[in-house]
Amino acid sequence: MGVSKLKKAELYYHKSVNDQVAAVLQELGACQIIATDEIPDSNNKDFTKGFDVAEEHVAEIRYLIRTLTPHFDDPIPSLDRMLGERPEVTMNELENLAAQTDLKKLCEEVRNVERETGEVKTGLTQAKNNKDLLSNLAFFDFPLSVVTEGTKTVKGVVGTAKTELLDGLRGALGDFSKFAQDSELFLADFDNKKPPREIYAGLIYSAGLEREILEAAAKNGVSVVDVPQEFKLTPKEELEKLESVITEFEAREKDLSAKIKMLANNNMPAVQQLSDYYNSMAGRYQEMAHSYGTESAMLTKFWIPTSEVDKLNEKINALGTDLELVLSDPAEDDEPPTLLQNGGLVRPFNILTELYSPPTYKGIDPTPLLAPFFWLFFGMCLGDAGYAIVMAGVIWYVFRKYKKIPSGIKDFIKLFAFCSVSTFLYGVVSGSFFGNFIDSFATFLVPLKNSLMLVDPMSNPMQVLGISLLLGVIHLMFGLLIAAYDKLRSGEIIDAIGNDLSWFMLIVGLCLLGTAMNGMLPEHFFDIGRAMAILGAVIIFIYAGKGKPGIINKIISGFLALYGSTSYLGDILSYSRLLALGFGSAVIGMVINLLGGLAGDIPYIGWLIGIVVIVGGHIFSILINILGAFVHPLRLQYVEFFGKFYSGGGKSFAPLRLSQEYVNVKA
């Protein structure tokens, strides 16, 4: 189907049904509002006011979710919720819940608990730091008041002293120093065999010699440590008091943790539902504010798929007679958004086009064109039948367990389901089943495996390289033909021939010429290839000089254009990654099997270790190789294939929808 046909809708309605119209358009989920800047605020005060109120509630919801989620025992795991396992509610139920819930009060309660928790954590941290300090000062038997306050005649300090400078410190302040009568030095015990870099020290001194004594201590490696002013007793006595303080803090912290957990478990289910409700309302009012307004009437313009028009008419008619819906086709100067609508087999590949850039409304949808190539390339890159069976089994389990998977996620999973088929087929024809598992551990299946093999990347990599490059030529030439077709249907016949078909003839002609020369094709293909290559080169040469002034410029342009053929060589060689990734997957599998086999030789428990190595190794290999098998074929589509005919440039269709992150909203 490609790009879905859209209608431009103009909905005229009385302001008395503002909310009903907005609800209908949002619940339908198929209307993209056309934004306009020509909106007097005074005529949209209902929508703008509604948006301001909803945004205020959204901010409260964000705070509550951010704060309460770490403490909430969510009965629905995140993966299950993402795959659609959410409570089902109606908008009326959400409106009633919003009316019954005082978010401001709840936020204030949570903030109070959060603030008190912060204060307790700060106090507890400070108390534990003080505990560490007091524990280090346990050797100091004097009241700490001598340090924090001192007296008229005596003062003291505590700090750390460098052990390598202790001799100098004792000489400066010890029994035989000039300060022997005016100071006393106390040192913590330490192991002389393994001395630390620093030890704690205490110093009591005469207040009148404070400056001289402290200077002597500093010169000999003493760094003073601040002691909190509230400490008056000895370190041991203060430590006993501090233990009770820490106990109180920890008990209070536990109570607050229980309280916020209770708040989370009691309120988070409602908060989650209100998150979807208020986000839906904010989105509704924000988009509807782009409507045109007068004192009594409104006009909302939007795009809608043709397939949804009947549903819209039915819902609009149910609102009464004060509405008028006018539909028209997009005008020439309109830029409608792009909605990709492809059939069941192609639809999962839509995401690949959207990841790059959707086509313009009147452009070519490349999804059906890239789908078979990506499908094939993925299979060649992963290239293991065993891995394909695991992929398919996991996907089957997911679809069996989860029945409400959102369409976008379901399509993405289906993409890998389809690719597991190509992976299995290529794994069979290349003889790869969990690497060389059959050859290593299930030799009775070797004859069956060998009978199905058509290629052998391990013993004959050049064969697979040739196939990869051939697929590259086909892929690139297909892109050129698409580009030529697009120009021909637009009436650009000369550009189609000179810019696309000429390169097709040159590249295909050279390929036929080379393969015929090597005896891989009958001799008459040599003449066909030579004729195509010459004709293509001549057209390229002439076309490149079109519009260039003077014969010299035309000739130079022609030669430069022909030199551009080297870029095609680089593009074709890029497809060698199909061999490289498939080969890498097989080699990793072989190494895992080898390690598992070696582990199996360990007495008694070797079999168990071997199983763990093989199973764990192949799970890791599947995950890492699926990533490579997705990214590299995608690069071939985006760079090599799209580079020949597709530029994107469209805007994705983004209809006004209900937010359904935490709940499924029923109609």
Image (spheres, rainbow, N blue to C red):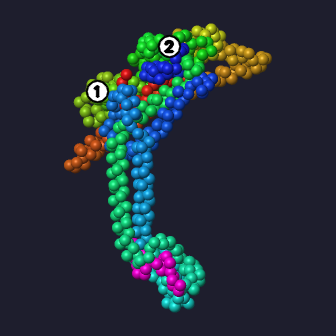
126 lies above or below 164:
above
Could you say which is closer to the camera, residue 90 or residue 596? 90
The residue where tag 2 is placed is: 323
Residue 559 percent across, percent down from the top left: 69, 21
Q: Which residues are magenta?
A: 135-158
Residue 650 percent across, percent down from the top left: 56, 21
Badge 1 crowding class, 10 Å Cα cut-off, few under 14, some 14 to 19, many 20 or more, is few
342 lies above or below 420:
above
Task: Left or right? Give the position of 581 relative to 559.
Answer: left
245 lies above or below 221:
above
Taking the image as drawn, is residue 442 in sight? Answer: yes
Q: Quadrant of the C terminus?
A: top left
Taking the image as drawn, is residue 625 in sight? Answer: no
In the image, which is nearer the foreground, mark 1 or mark 2? 2
Residue type at tag 2: Leu
Residue type at tag 1: Arg
The numbered disc on residue 400 is: 1
Q: Identify the secondary structure beneath mark 2.
A: strand
465 lies above or below 249:
above
**Disc 1 to disc 2, C-alpha distance:** 45 Å
Q: Residue at x 53, y 84 (%)?
A: 152
